Image (cartoon, coloured by chain):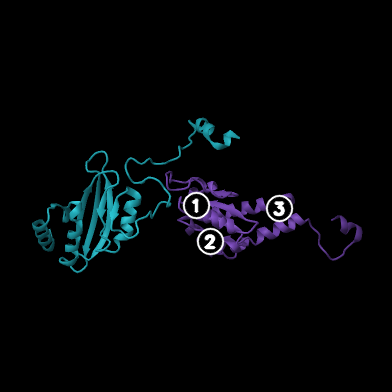
Chain colours: A cyan, B purple
Amino acid sequence: MNEHLQFVAASLAGRFEIQLSEFRDQVSLLVQAQQILPICQALRDEFEFNMLSAQTAVDYWPQEQPRFHILYQLYSLAKNVRIGLRVPLDGNIPTLPSIEGIYPNANWHEREIWDMFGVRFEGHSDLRRILMPYDWEGHPLRKDYPLGYEEVQFSFNYDEIDRRKPYMKE
Amino acid sequence: MGIEQKLGNMGAVTLRLEEAVNWARTNAMWPMLFGLACCAIEMMSAQAASYDMSRFGMELMRASPRQSDLMIVAGRVSRKMAPVLRRLYDQMPDPKWVIAMGDCASCGGVFNNYAIVQGVDEVVPVDVYVAGCPPRPEALIHGIVTLHEKVRGEKIKDWA
């Protein structure tokens, strides 16, 4: 692990309760939902991680509890190191403090997470759907959301599907 | 033809109104810039130097729907884009035609899911479907020539 990252991880482990995991020079910290704001503030102000390069979510239903993991990837331009944060969340519409005040580009990332997973961010200035139409119901990237596909009409089921088509009713 | 036989060479050419109007419509049909995704690249290359669409009358592509006759829907239409597409189609003045270019516009293509409109004929009435992913410029030109033949065959009771 990079020396700077070792120093960062050691000092954060002293102040907050985090779990460190490392895989081939990639460092990932598992943090709790209430601590995400002070941790991000510390990372930006004291340790010079000035860029949020990615913020996404993963749905582990039904294999794992808690169901959602929100991932943050922070990058330090001066030191050229990256660090990842993971926040586990559970429930139907879980809430999490928004880091828009610390990294302003989290605005669209958090709108996308709300749209696709249904995780609400408190303190977000404008939380609405960004990819789907504004009156869409449901959160598409959850694992229990149906694929929404149209059944393909091959030659073996050609007649069955033809019977259900709207032009057959005329 | 009848009147020339009776009155001789008057120095004028006569033809049916249908033929004249349809000839004028096909020879100067201006498409609207509606390239959404990858099919737009093939539409651009069909308009460019090697496969020239200007020889078929499509000298330029107008970005404004008010000044265009033909809408080539090139690319996949998402559910969020479908009302926008309908609005632009409604803003085009008559006579107007629609070519669904590519697989995604014709039937949803490879994207068989909740987010993509499965065939743009759910939204606008389509005259010619061009298959391909993406269709070669020659295939698009073939589709345009097919549309021209269709327009040449239109009767006066359709548009009058």
Query: Residue at label 3?
Result: B159
Which disc, if any, is residue B33?
A: 2
Res B152 seen here: yes
- Nearer to us of marks 2 and 1 is 1
How far, Cα to Cα, is label 2 from label 1?
A: 16 Å
> Could you tell me which residue is drawn at 84 percent across and 56 percent down?
B1
Q: What amino acid is labelled 1 in the image?
A: Ala
Mark before the other along the chain sequence, 1 or 3: 1
| Chain letter of the residue beneath label 3 in the structure image | B
Label 3 neighbourhood size at 10 Å, few (<14), some (14-19), many (20+)? few
How far, Cα to Cα, is label 2 from label 3?
A: 25 Å
Q: Which of B29 and A4 is in front in this view?
A: A4
* Dot 2 and dot 1 within a common chain: yes
Q: Nearer the viewer, residue A36 or B147?
A: A36
Q: What amino acid is labelled 3 in the image?
A: Trp
- Tags 2 and 1 touching, CB below 8 Å: no
Disc 3 is placed on an element classified as helix
B130 horizontally vs A118: left or right: right
Q: What amino acid is labelled 2 in the image?
A: Leu
Mark before the other along the chain sequence, 2 or 3: 2
| Chain letter of the residue beneath label 1 in the structure image | B
Vertical position of residue A49 compared to residue A23: above or below = below
